[in-house]
Image: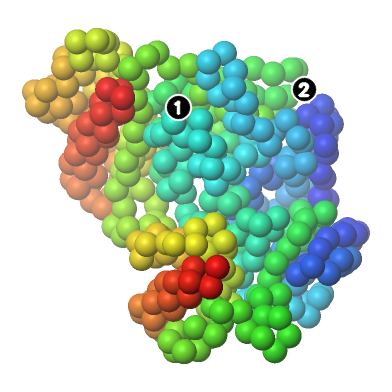
Amino acid sequence: MRYLAPTTLDDAIQLLSGDPGDCRVLAGGTDLLVRLRSGDAEPDSILDIKRIEDLRQITPEDGGWRIGAAVSSAEMNEHAELKAAYPGVCEASDLIGSTQIQGRCTLAGNLCNASPAADSVPAMVAVRAMARVAGPNGTRDVAVEDIPTGPGKTSLEKGEFVASIFLPAKPDRSGDAYLRFIPRTEMDIAVVGCGVSLTLDDSGTCTAARVSLGAVGPKVMVVDAAAEALIGTKLDDAAMDALAKACSEAASPIADKRGTVEFRTHVAGVLARRAAAIAKTRAEG
Amino acid sequence: MSNIHVTTTINGDPTEYLCAPDETLLDVLRDRLGMTGSKEGCGTGDCGACSVTVNGRLVCSCLMLGAEAEGAKIETIEGMAEGDQLHPLQQKFIEHAALQCGICTPGILVAAKSLLEKNPDPTEEEARYWLAGNLCRCTGYDKIIRAVLDTAADLRKAS
């Protein structure tokens, strides 16, 4: 195996697209190194992107924020402005693994690992995050929900990788939140995850909303019916009931040791209601 | 497979080593540099027994390649005591009997030191969350948490 550590994005693209064998991108490594050890991955080369200065930055852009693919969850959560703008995304990234894992893991890595239960992904989807994909034919911006295609699978072409995540500007009086259920208090994989982002007008009526679910299908899902249940309401009990119902109906989970189908279906609604309440409080400021 | 030459600083000492591209930092520390204080519990980042800090950031050395440490400042359990003078956390762990078999102890001490550097006055909840990635199968954690909070209180008094 070769270890490659380019210092520019152009060199990284050239190395990745020019590699005749299996070349894996290394960001935080918290999934890749586990796969190397288990033999699940036997790459010919590893491309470490952490020495590319641009990919280590959190940068304001067009009223939103661009987060480089090598930025760790810990770095995001130490960034006061980013946390104030996107508390839901930051909290979701702060739920990935332990303190030690959070010191290394990245949004881009969590996305490209393509686990249906990835914590940061529903949170990113809720705020309409875009992944900037770099490759031999230049860069393209892809909605985060279109990167994973199923467990462990992505829509990235050979030679492409996610260079950064863009969290677009939010309208005034907007809030986001992410909640997950796990059987213990820390260090477990989501049984259900739910991201909610919403915007209120001056009268407190919800004018825009986006609701996403994780761990209840082969990939993250956007639940339009859940958003529609909120839009035009003042997020009263009836709206919250309709939101919960829409999320439970959208969930199509598997049963495993962490939860049954019935339990996951129910919890999808419960978490949506709670996450929407937090997002509402945040939108009210 | 050709080895990679890495220049780094470990516990304040400039250190150079050669490692294979797929060799973890933990394997470098233990097998090439003879620093066996960092333990391998799981090798998959679940147990925290291999905890070290890299440029001040707490990480699992089993989830990092040795090659990634080029230019980095690494602190391990071997750098915690100054000669025969134990670090206050190490002393408190003895006083509180906060260890039994001891395999998790180096990782917990490194993680706890990192916590107190970031947050000198953690609540019990904060300490428990910070150390959630350090598994101990003997103590039930209570003595560990008390030792950490007691050390924090002493260090605050001393400063």
Q: Position of residue A96 (x, y in %)?
A: 47, 49
- How far apart are labels 1 and 2 at the CA level? 33 Å
For numbered disc 1, what is the local secondary structure? helix
Q: Chain of mark 1?
A: A
Rendered image: mark on residue A177: none
Mark 2 Cα-neighbour bin, 10 Å: few <14, some 14–19, many ≥20: some
For numbered disc 2, what is the local secondary structure? loop
Of residues A31 and B55, the one drawn nearer to the viewer in this rendering: B55
Sequence order check, earlier mark of 1 and 2: 1
Q: Where is the N terminus of chain A found, in terms of image quarters?
A: bottom right
Of residues B10 and A231, the one drawn nearer to the viewer in this rendering: B10
Q: Position of residue A126 (x, y in %)?
A: 39, 26
Picture layout, residue B68 above or below residue B14: above
The image quarter containing residue B127 is bottom left
Of residues A111 and B149, the one drawn nearer to the viewer in this rendering: B149
Any part of residue B58 in sight? yes
Q: Where is the C terminus of chain A found, in terms of image quarters?
A: top left
Q: Which residue is located at x 62 percent, y 26 percent? A: A59
Q: Which residue is located at x 16 percent, y 14 percent? A: A233
Q: Position of residue A183 (x, y in %)?
A: 29, 57
Any part of residue A211 in sight? no
What amino acid type should be assigned to the residue bearing mark 2?
Answer: Pro
What amino acid type should be assigned to the residue bearing mark 1?
Answer: Ala
Q: Which residue is located at x 40 percent, y 13 percent? A: A171
The residue that disc 1 covers is: A85
Side (left or right) of A219 relative to A148:
left
The residue that disc 2 covers is: A136
Q: Chain of mark 2?
A: A
Side (left or right) of B39 relative to A285:
right
Mark 1 Cα-neighbour bin, 10 Å: few <14, some 14–19, many ≥20: some
Q: Which residue is located at x 50 percent, y 36 percent? A: A80
Asked if labels 1 and 2 share a chain, the reply is: yes
